[in-house]
Amino acid sequence: MQTRVLKLKLRTLNRAKAARLELLQAEFTACTAFHLERVQALKTTSPTKVHQDCYREARSQFALPASTLQRARDKAIAAQRSYLQRRKRDRRANPPRFTRPLPIALAAENLRVFPDKSMVRVTTPDGFIWLPLIIPTCFTEMARQPHGASELVRKGPDWSLLLTVTCEDVPAGEGERPHCGLDLGVANLAVLSGPGLVRFVDGKPLRYTRGRYFRYRQALQTKRKLGMVKRSKGKESRWATDLNHQVSRQIVNEVAAVGGVLHVEKLLGIRDRTKGTAKVNRMLHSWPFAQLLTFIGYKAQAAGVQVIEEDPRHTSQRCSRCGHTERGNRLKQALFRCKSCQYEIHADLNAARNLAAKGASSLGAGSVTEPPNGEVVGSSDHGNRNLASSL
């Protein structure tokens, strides 16, 4: 089974429904802050101990369903755990605080979607709220699948539902299917590798556009034009979403054309693993990698392509030819040269091949062989000038 998160926008709400949602959001935020204070006072992240200490008090203090109270408790515990993990890794971190309204976390039993009516029903202490949804055609079938804990997110006057659905895995076809690996980054947004397939997605448009918007906002902030700053952020976000749609469609089409299985890296810690200049770090922390993988996920589901997450540890240090793993193998951002066999290849392409090999091995399909010389499909010029000898 695979889990997908669908972002579904709500239609414009009338004043009564908008006021009820705002009240529910304020109550949930206050409840989460209450639990965070208790977690920090008790110096524990055990859900059982926190529940025993403050559940009855929370039930009497906040007008929320029991399951929503538990979601507020879990969010507070998750925030504290994240803070403690960052401190453990000797990273600067401030204790968490909830100063802004939080997304409303909804348990599965407090939410029901009606795709045929384009409505969602939310359970509150004072009854149901029926909210009109905008469900794109590509999401209609997925919205019918069983759903789990989801969230209602507010951005300005607009609300969206982040619906978590569970879908069946795409069944494997007859015989062994080709295994493709996908490496994500900033210099190259994505590098796709598979038998007879290499695809580089250049990161220059990202770096240029992000930098242009950043300098534009700096100039506006100097002139105290904060309204224009907010509008520019919206334009940049829409541009990034459109680019992610294009990249995800390109990747899924390439893998579907060869009937392959796509292995992607787990995003956990991607911003900690990747280091660079202040400019690169700014783009890295602002780029929606999770959105790109979400788009790849639902497009792959529709195209019959299986997507599997893999642990990316050591994929940038391991030689895709002989398997030798050493930090010194990666000489530069774009250059990988094995200390053992002297194999030279683009570093991102090497990581993508390692992801494919790791996925194939975990599925018992053996190793992934390198494509023969000259068999390069759909690759861009960027980063490929020296690939002919390495392929």
Image (cartoon, rainbow, N blue to C red):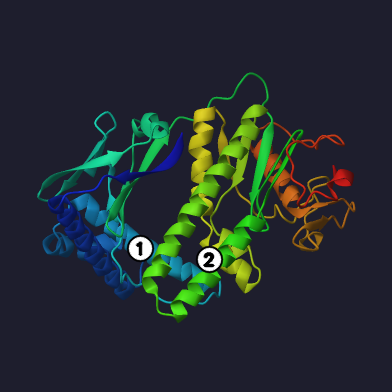
Q: Is any part of residue 43 visible from this angle?
A: yes
Residue 222: percent from left, percent from top: 46, 81
Residue drawn 35% across and 63% down?
77
Mark 2 is surrounded, within 10 Å at the Cα level, by few (under 14), some (14 to 19) or many (20 or more) other residues, namely some
Q: Amino acid at mark 2?
A: Tyr
Residue linked to disc 1? 77
Residue drawn 67% across and 42% down?
181
Residue linked to disc 2? 213
Which corner quadrant holds the C terminus? top right
Looking at the image, which is closer to me, 354 or 127? 127
Mark 1 is surrounded, within 10 Å at the Cα level, by few (under 14), some (14 to 19) or many (20 or more) other residues, namely many
Whichever of callouts 2 and 1 sits on the residue coming sooner in the sequence is 1
- Report whether 318 appears left or right of 150: right
Residue 35: percent from left, percent from top: 27, 66
Outermost residue, left direction? 126
Q: Is any part of residue 46 visible from this angle?
A: no
Residue 359: percent from left, percent from top: 65, 39
Residue drawn 53% across and 64% down?
285
Between marks 2 and 1 in the image, the one whose residue lies nearer the viewer = 2
Q: Quadrant of residue 253?
A: top right
Residue drawn 33% across and 45% down?
9
Residue 386: percent from left, percent from top: 85, 50
CA distance separating discs 2 and 1: 36 Å
Q: Amino acid at mark 1?
A: Ile
Q: Secondary structure at mark 1?
A: helix
Q: Secondary structure at mark 2?
A: helix
Question: In the picture shown, does residue 183 fall above or below 257?
Answer: below
Q: Quadrant of residue 7?
A: top left
Looking at the image, which is closer to me, 241 or 254? 241
